[in-house]
Image (cartoon, rainbow, N blue to C red):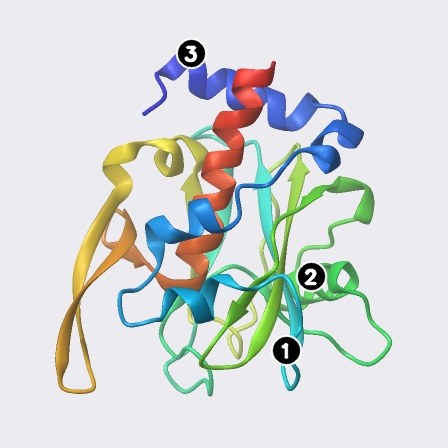
Amino acid sequence: MLNNDALDSAVSCIYSFPLEKLRDMSLPGPSAWRLMLPPFIEEAESLALRQKRGGERDAAVLILLHRGPRGPSFPLLERPEGMRHHPGQIALPGGGLEPNETALDAALRETREELGVTVTAASVHLSLSPIFVLPSKYLVHPFLACVETPPDYKLNGGEASSLFEVPLSNLLDSSSRSTFLLHRKGRTWDVPCFRFGDKIVWGLTAMILAEFAQLAGSIEKLS
């Protein structure tokens, strides 16, 4: 766990660290993902994720970090129960690529469609490690954007039932890491997760956030 001074330093570095150096940094990828890997997913299937194997579709998500009343924070969405993939789960804004669209284009478009917020490519500081999602067969490309002011959200109710914000300090606090019991296919699993108040974040989103948290700590050490 980082102390308050280290948290402030890490956050400051994420905003001011040279973009070229960010892009050249070695991403933790699987070493961070394993901390949040659901036990019912075979590690070999979930972590061999850097190349396409055929049949998957590309998708993208965005961590939209901004300064706010509780310090730097980012939004998470709760998906409607009626959605085809991952109903009721908590997710980052994002979705599948459209024809002739790059992963970054998709992340920015989906953020605009779901949150009503326009983010420019110039605000995107980093692409994180792509990660394969077994149930939906998506290869997901996460991006990190940093903006100065709190966004004026206009939530798309068809894409999200609600939105809440997570202060970066909460993500980096080790006490946010926990487990919960998940009943699946006749078995009960103890699944790793992040707990933010009464919200449980697990699976793909938790794995992406685990890499982001590890990266934030690495940036602080390099400063």
CA gap, disc 2 to disc 3? 32 Å
The CA span between labels 1 and 3 is 44 Å
Earlier residue among tags 1 and 3: 3
Image spot of residue 108 (x, y percent): 72, 59
Q: Which of 134/201 is in front?
A: 134
- Determine whether, in the image, residue 178 is placed left or right of residue 121: left
Q: In the depicted view, which residue is nearer to us: 24 or 115? A: 24
Q: Amino acid at mark 2?
A: Ala
Please tell me which residue is depicted at 13% across the width and 86% down the height of the picture. 186
**Could you tell me if residue 108 is visible in this image?**
yes
> 217 above or below 141?
above
Residue in view at x 61 percent, y 21 percent: 13
- The numbered dot on residue 210 is none
**Foreground label between 1 and 3:** 1
Residue 179 falls in which quadrant of the image?
bottom left
Q: Position of residue 129 (x, y in %)?
A: 60, 52
Q: Nearer the viewer, mark 2 or mark 1?
A: 1
Residue labelled with disc 3: 5
